[in-house]
Image (tube, rainbow, N blue to C red):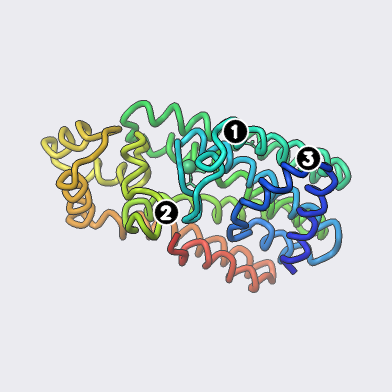
Amino acid sequence: MLSAVERKIEQFITELGDKEVSTLYAKLPAGKRLRAKLILKIAGNHLTAVKTAAVVEMIHAASLLHDDVIDDAYTRRNKPSLNALYGNKTAIMLGDILYSKGFFELNNISTEVAKIVSNAVVQLSLGELGDVSLSKTFNVDKSRYLKMIYQKTASLIEASAGAAAVLAGKPKEAYLTYGRNLGLAFQMIDDILDITQDAETLGKPALHDFVEGKTTLPYIYLYEAMTDEERVKLESLHAKVLKPEEQLWIQAKMKEYHIIETSYLEAKTLIEEAISLMSAHGEASLAGIAKEMIEREF
Ligand code: FPP
Ligand code: MG
């Protein structure tokens, strides 16, 4: 029933009565719609669930439009990003339009759902600020990384599951935890793929995060495993454009210390926890979405 969500988003965009916005929106790749799938799976396919899913996907799309400006990213899902096609100003404004229309529609759902979703947007904005701040230093503090990915990514997935539970009259807490675990695992996998996937699959240069100054989970574990000498070298490469041999050195060290396996296991453990929590609530069908988070390739 994801097509109902696509139609609802299109309807919200058409209501704006602005041709340019419709044209720009049509340029955005739809993405995996994981948050929408989660909402419909938990709350069912009724109109309020479809509206909530549409709002959440609009907010998510807005956050990615802004994120690509912040990250100087010229591709998104293997296509030119909107900032690459039309410049930063247009990308920021389209983000603002999607975001504010989404908020307007949120008012027509319910106060509790509106509170859950709007609070997540505060968190995701704080998380993005945290990401930018952390990338200015060589951060090897795992708890700061975890807090930042919780805010930046897990908060909206947590809110999607929680809001859907509210709509369906199901116990909110368990669903919030399920969504939080999914979100944390999702971002961990995103950070792993930045290291393991080739540039073509990713649609961005490999090791882009480290070049951008981001020391994600694999770098934190790598630093922990390294000798003092290796640590000095790793730190000296932080936030710099890497020569091919430097890239290969990082990737070889990741291999030597089994960093990808360790990081992947952490994401997998969160997913397994989420799945068993949901099966305890008779929601075995939510296992599929959880598995999608860790089995994806980009
Ligand atoms: C992607 O992270 C970014 C996010 C999940 C959140 C971005 C949030 C904002 C820009 C706050 C603004 C919010 C609104 C609603 C306008 P990433 O760069 O690690 O992942 P990527 O590989 O997908 O780029
Ligand atoms: Mg980004």
| Label ID, residue 101 | 3
Question: Tag 1 or tag 2, which sits nearer the N-term?
Answer: 1
Q: Secondary structure at mark 1?
A: helix
Q: Position of residue 175 (x, y in %)?
A: 67, 56
Q: Quadrant of ligand 1?
A: top right
Q: Amino acid at mark 2?
A: Gly
Q: Amino acid at mark 1?
A: Ser
Choose between 181 and 214: the one closer to the eye. 214
Observer-side mark, 2 or 3, equals: 2
Within-10-Å neighbours for mark 2: few <14, some 14–19, many 20+: some
Instruction: Mark 2 or mark 3: name the one nearer the start of the chain.
Output: 3
- Describe residue 199's horizontal placement relative to residue 47 as left or right: left
Residue beneath disc 2: 203
The quadrant in which the C terminus is found is: bottom left
- Label 2: element kind: loop
State how far apart marks 2 and 3 are (Cα). Answer: 29 Å
Q: What's under tag 3, amino acid-wise?
A: Lys
Say which residue label 1 marks. 125
For the point 34% across and 39% down, which residue is it? Answer: 215
Quadrant housing residue 19: top right
The percent coordinates of residue 251 (x first, y second) are 22, 52
